[in-house]
Image (cartoon, coloured by chain):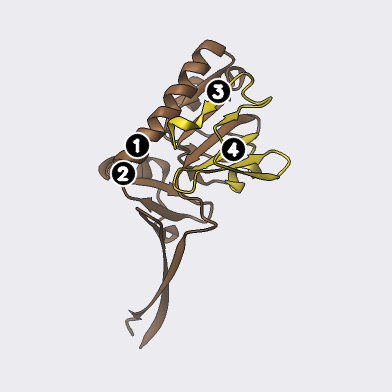
Chain colours: A brown, B yellow
Amino acid sequence: MASEVQEEMSVTATHDSVLLTLDFSPLHMTDEEFYEFCQRNQDFRFEMDKEGNLIVTPPTFLETSRKNTRINVRLGAWAEQDNTGVAFESDGMFTLPNGAKRVPDAFWILKGRYDALSKEEREERFARIGSRLRYRVALKVGQSTQTTEQNARIHRKRRAARVAD
Amino acid sequence: MHEYIENGVRLGWLIDPYEKRVHIYRADESVEVLENPQKISGEAVLSGFELDLTEIW
């Protein structure tokens, strides 16, 4: 006897990129496994939302990368001279208090907050930026979602076979 | 971006180089949209930091 399982995948198209949201929750990956997965697929950028959906972004176009670098260079130079905080660039993945794993294009936190993390915490696969940290700036470069985004939802029905015993 | 704010970020910038627009997300949950700004300030959060956006547009 077969039952139908509804799969939903979300595809968001913008000017020059396609963003995929996939329901990854059935996979129950540990942080280590997810890190391994990201390492093996380095051409893509991944994030995970708090529900366990995997968000996949293709590699950035050259122009976007150039702009990103500009911002990171400026932020980094200021951070060094200002010396009150620590800047992170666009491949740092952070675990937010709500469990989501995010990759901001640029990030800066107060030095005291960063120093408060233990060595282990800092070297964790996806540093846990917890509630006792107050991080300062998250930066995203890219298409604003309000005006020009097109959304497509793809529904697929899949038959799941159940073996009668 | 709202998620960042809900999770403790004090200041967030969403920079749209296509529309030349910056969305400023603040800790009080407000969002300010700037059209074609020349620069944005780090305000009290990144005191003394100014991002020159003409390099980005």
> How far across and how far down the image is residue A146, in percent?
55, 57
Residue A90 versus residue A55 in the image, above or below: above
CB atoms of marks 1 and 4 within 8 Å: no
For discs 2 and 4, the disc positioned in front in the rendered view: 2
Q: What element carries label 2?
A: loop
The amino acid on which the numbered mark 1 sits, given as a three-letter code, is Ser
Residue B12 bears which disc, if any? Answer: 4
CB atoms of marks 1 and 2 within 8 Å: yes
Asked which quadrant contains residue A135, the reply is top right
Q: How far apart are marks 3 and 2 (CA)?
A: 34 Å
Chain under disc 1: A
Residue at point 48%, 59% (across, down): A148
Q: Name the residue under label 3.
A: A117
Label 1 environment density (alpha carbons within 10 Å; few <14, some 14–19, many ≥20): some
Q: Is residue A118 left or right of residue A10?
A: right
> How far across and how far down the image is residue A143, in percent?
46, 50
Chain under disc 4: B
Q: Mark 2 points at which residue?
A: A61
Instruction: Tell me which numbered mark, 1 or 3, is placed earlier along the sequence.
Output: 1
Q: Is mark 3 on a helix, strand or loop?
A: loop
The amino acid on which the numbered mark 3 sits, given as a three-letter code, is Leu
**Same chain assignment for discs 1 and 3:** yes
CB atoms of marks 1 and 3 within 8 Å: no
Q: Is residue A59 left or right of residue A115?
A: left
For discs 1 and 3, the disc positioned in front in the rendered view: 1
The amino acid on which the numbered mark 2 sits, given as a three-letter code, is Phe
Label 2 environment density (alpha carbons within 10 Å; few <14, some 14–19, many ≥20): few
Label 4 environment density (alpha carbons within 10 Å; few <14, some 14–19, many ≥20): many
